[in-house]
């Protein structure tokens, strides 16, 4: 299942190299390598206008893209600690094609076959750092340089002539005083010309920036329209109304993950973030005690959390008091960590009775079951999990998955398949 391994593009900078634009990227695919991705000026300018590199925020390019209102839109996620924001920028079709080519590679060696990719170990000539400088019109910059050079030559010629003195001046010791005076004048003139040059460059840059910003400004339409995936804290959701829910309205689908938190949870969350889709995690109390930081990670990234009981017992076989304890205590453990209400409960094995429904209702909880089970817990095979979902009815489905490496391996393909069916992948609320 190597072709399902997640690929991550961490954006480190934007560079102008010999007049071309390059994204400096940490590319992770089994291992991490530094690459330069050549892009067009249009895409580069829009991305420059959007990101501000500093020591706090990290940026990750998404493989996701949209065609909206006659424009191509690409996605970059901005992350600071546990907070994440999805940003959109206009791009070219060429940029999208390049992302798709990277997405399709099955090993790192294939990177070298892509003409628009350079490994950083194979440096290009004259790299210019340009988070800010790449906005400058370099042709105008060269003209400014020529003006400066000419002014310097004129200045030097004046100084040489003014430094010419006769022997009498030398004998009278006038030269030392003259040189000191002239050097001071020269230094002042130097500052004047340097300030002039810097001001000229600044004006060029500001003019170029404003022109490009005006040219590439997004049309005044709401990017959170249903035609475009929503940002992390605006992921589509379905509010459950029934005491027991098995399915969703047509056109919606929910990916649910049982038995966490675990060592696999964070990577599952990261994949969902990469595709900007919903996910709901049903967590077991004993595991919550082991990985409280993972619970916080799920919640801080905008994904729904439900209880999967305290100890993963078959609830139907328990007494009333034990059922109540399993539900209430597991919810309290989650609430202590995320400081938010827990309203979803999934009984282990899908086993429940009317007594459990009453307990859940009394505690303002909804019981969530499923209508699509690819039996990932049984096969533990990514290919078979994907095949089961592809061959099933997914519109209106609540898909049951468990946290495992096999699910991580096939999750990107599952998401892509559901998106191809024009289904909205939602959080449950």
Image: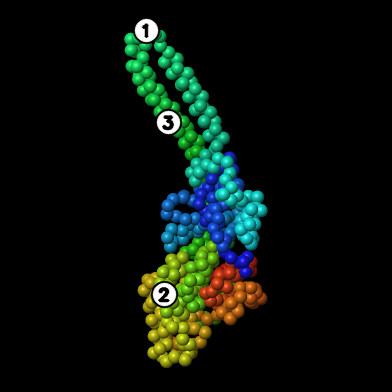
The residue closer to the viewer here, 213 or 152, is 152
* Relative height, residue 189 to residue 295 (above, below): above
Residue 376 location in percent, x, y?
58, 78
Q: Is residue 88 visible?
A: no
Q: Which residue is mark 2?
A: 290
Way the structure is coloured: rainbow
Residue 91 location in percent, x, y?
59, 51
The residue closer to the viewer here, 305 or 363, is 305
**Where residue 168 is drawn, which disc sits there?**
1
Which tag is nearer the camera, tag 1 or tag 3? 1
* Relative height, residue 341 to residue 323 (above, below): above
Label whose residue precedes the other's in the sequence (3 or 2):
3
Instruction: Say which residue appears at 38% left-offset and 81% top-offset.
Output: 329
Residue 287 location in percent, x, y?
44, 77
**Where residue 195 is drawn, which disc sits there?**
3
Labels 3 and 2 touching (C-beta < 8 A): no
Which tag is nearer the camera, tag 2 or tag 1? 1
The residue closer to the viewer here, 211 or 303, is 303
Instruction: Say which residue appears at 57% left-offset and 49% top-offset.
Output: 121
């Amino acid at each position: 299942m190597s072709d399902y391994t997640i690929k991550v593009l961490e954006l480190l900078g934007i560079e102008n190299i010999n007049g071309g634009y390059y994204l400096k990227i940490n590319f992770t695919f089994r291992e991490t390598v530094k690459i330069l991705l050549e892009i067009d000026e249009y895409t580069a300018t829009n991305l420059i206008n959007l990101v501000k590199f500093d020591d706090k925020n990290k940026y990750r390019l998404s493989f996701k893209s949209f065609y909206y209102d006659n424009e191509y839109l690409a996605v970059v996620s901005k992350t600071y600690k546990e907070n994440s924001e999805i940003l959109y920028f206009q791009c070219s079709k060429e940029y999208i094609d390049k992302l798709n080519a990277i997405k399709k590679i099955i090993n790192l060696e294939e990177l070298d076959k892509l003409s628009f990719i350079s490994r950083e170990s194979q440096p290009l000539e004259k790299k210019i750092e340009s988070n800010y400088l790449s906005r400058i019109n370099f042709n105008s910059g060269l003209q400014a340089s020529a003006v400066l050079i000419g002014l310097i030559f004129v200045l030097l010629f004046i100084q040489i002539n003014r430094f010419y003195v006769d022997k009498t001046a030398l004998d009278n010791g006038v030269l030392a005083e003259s040189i000191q005076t002239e050097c001071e004048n020269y230094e002042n003139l130097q500052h004047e010309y340097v300030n002039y040059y810097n001001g000229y460059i600044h004006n060029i840059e500001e003019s170029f920036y404003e022109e490009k910003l005006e040219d590439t400004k997004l049309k005044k339409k709401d990017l959170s329209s249903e035609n475009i995936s929503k940002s992390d804290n605006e992921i589509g959701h379905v509010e459950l109304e029934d005491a027991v829910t098995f399915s969703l309205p047509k056109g919606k689908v929910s990916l649910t993950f049982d038995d966490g938190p675990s060592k696999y949870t964070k990577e599952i969350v990261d994949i969902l973030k990469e595709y900007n889709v919903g996910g709901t995690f049903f967590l077991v109390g004993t595991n919550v005690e082991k990985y409280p930081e993972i619970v916080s990670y799920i919640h801080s990234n905008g994904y729904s959390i439900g209880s999967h009981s305290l100890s993963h017992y078959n609830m139907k076989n328990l007494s009333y008091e034990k059922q109540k304890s399993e539900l209430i205590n597991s919810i309290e453990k989650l609430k202590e960590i995320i400081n938010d209400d827990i309203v979803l409960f999934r009984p282990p094995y899908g086993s429940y009775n009317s007594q459990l429904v009453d307990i859940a209702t009394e505690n303002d909880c909804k019981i969530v079951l499923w209508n699509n089970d690819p039996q990932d817990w049984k096969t533990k095979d990514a290919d078979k999990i994907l095949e089961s979902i592809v061959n099933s009815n997914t519109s209106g489905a609540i898909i049951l998955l468990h946290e495992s490496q096999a699910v991580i391996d096939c999750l990107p393909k599952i998401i892509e398949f559901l998106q191809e069916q024009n289904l909205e992948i939602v959080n449950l609320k």
